[in-house]
Image: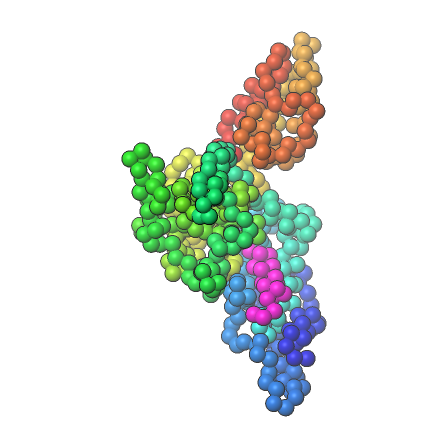
Amino acid sequence: MPGDDFHRSLIMEPNGLPPYTTIPSLAGWKGDIVKAINRLTNLQRTHDAALPRGVAPSNLRLSGQGRVAGDLTNPFVVDAAIERYHAGARQAGAPDNQLSQSILGSLLVDIYTVTGQFTRSITRNTNLRTDRDCALFPLYRSLHFAAADVFGSVFGINGDEIDVYLRNQLIFMSTHGVGVDTYVGKMKHTDANGQKASRLAYLGDEEALACQLHVEGGRLMITNGQGQLEPFDCSGPEYKDISKTKKGDFTKTANPARRGKEQNGGLGVAGFSMGLNRNIYARKHSNYDAAKGSFYHSCYLEGREVLCTGCITVVDGELKYINNWSGHYQPSRQQLSLAIQALRARGVDITNVRVEYQQTNGSQVSQLAPAFLESDGVHGADFDGFSKGRFVGTARKVREALTAYETRSKKWWASPSDKSKAILGHLKGIGDDETLVRETRFLLGEKIQDSHYQPVSPLKTNRRLQYDPYESGQLKDMLTEAMSDLERY
């Protein structure tokens, strides 16, 4: 049973431990780790004894505590996630309100994310995985499924829907971002190959890999020109450059992601984006890069939805600073918390990481990451990642406006147009707060969204609300007033 066959037996054969039906205690988890390692030791002895004389044990067996992220697994990362979950569960209590659900959901996603990452790494990296990785695989997999089931019970859904939930955490580009990309995308420049191309440097999947950061031993790493991982560093002069021309525009060498007032000790920053799978991409941004053109937060994932964007400072692989400063996506501090939690779940030490976030009124707040994650604004009733809370107030006002309009339209003197009645019925049928707000903005004439927002249920008539006689004008006025306090798209 040499080589990969031995690993398959570790992964697939029963390990004598019952599957988890809930999140185990930290002591219980550590006890199961010991049992799994004892099983491994016994199987190694049996395997080695069966080898022909002169044949060395498998060279895939590596000693040590395991490795993190790109180099597979580290059970201590899971230890920390379990410990955080139980501490948070004691704080949150029963999941009978939005606050407790948001806390528990966040911590369960931590466990689900890291165990999913570990199981995928073990199955896909047959030349890197160790005996230890494979011996712990059944535990990671069982805990992964348990996290999904517990998540489902917290939110009253099927555990299989956790991936749908994760997609719902994504945010769209802001109207500012779409406007910038539309404008810059129409401009041409001469690229590195001497060809005329759009000045907007959207990356394809293969190009994005060159910007992807990996986590190894808790450090952020990036692939160099020789295809090897090396510590990422964006603290130096190239990333600090914010020089401008006499006209006030950034120069060709400048990094527009940096504002120059970050509370990061005067170091440089790289822009970053994190997608659905929690992969993080980072590099220097540019308005006039000679080879690639203009590069913004939207370029890593070609303008698609993201979990979070902002800027980071990394010194020799060590994360020092992170913020949510991005005009293209305008992520909330709740989105920023999701990104920090995802990094922590993959083994990044956030103890001394400085977090700076921009509030909707334009002011900045600076905290260390642990304090930031414990703050009320992150786990409060407006927790975007779980409740879509930033749309709750506006959606309520839209529904109140619809009810008032419907009451008005039934008066003997009212004469609502067929278009107004169709739009009323359409909006009343939308149950999701975020979808209702986005659809209302579309109907009110938010032209910038045309190519990025797919209407929920297109009406056969012209769907835009325009001023026409009688009730359509009233409906537009009432919806416009309801939308007036929406701070961020």
Question: Is 463 left, or right, of 288 in this rendering?
Answer: right
Q: Can residue 328 be seen at all in this image of the molecule?
A: no
Residue at image x 58%, y 28%? 442
Query: In x, y percent, where is residue 83?
Result: 53, 61
Query: In x, y percent, where is residue 301?
Result: 53, 46
Q: In the orientation shown, which residue stands out farthest toward the top?
A: 413
Residue at image x 38%, y 50%? 269
Residue 112 is a magenta residue? yes
In this view of the protein, which residue sits in the foreground, 161 or 222?
222
Residue at image x 60%, y 48%? 166
Residue at image x 67%, y 19%? 419
User: Relative to residue 148, is residue 65 depicted above or below?
Assistant: below
> Mostly what secondary structure, the magenta segment?
helix
In this view of the protein, which residue sits in the foreground, 229 or 197?
197
Query: In x, y percent, where is residue 377?
Result: 47, 43
Q: In the orientation shown, which residue stands out farthest toward the bottom?
A: 53
Q: In the orientation shown, which residue stands out farthest toward the front?
A: 194
The quarter of the displayed image where residue 189 is located: top left
Q: Can residue 253 be seen at all in this image of the molecule?
A: yes
The image quadrant where one finds the N terminus is bottom right
User: Relative to residue 355, is residue 404 depicted above or below?
Assistant: above
Question: Is 141 left, or right, of 226 in this rendering?
Answer: right
Looking at the rendering, the stretch of residues picked out in magenta corresponds to 110-128
User: Relative to residue 295, is residue 483 depicted above or below?
Assistant: above
The quarter of the displayed image where residue 38 is located: bottom right
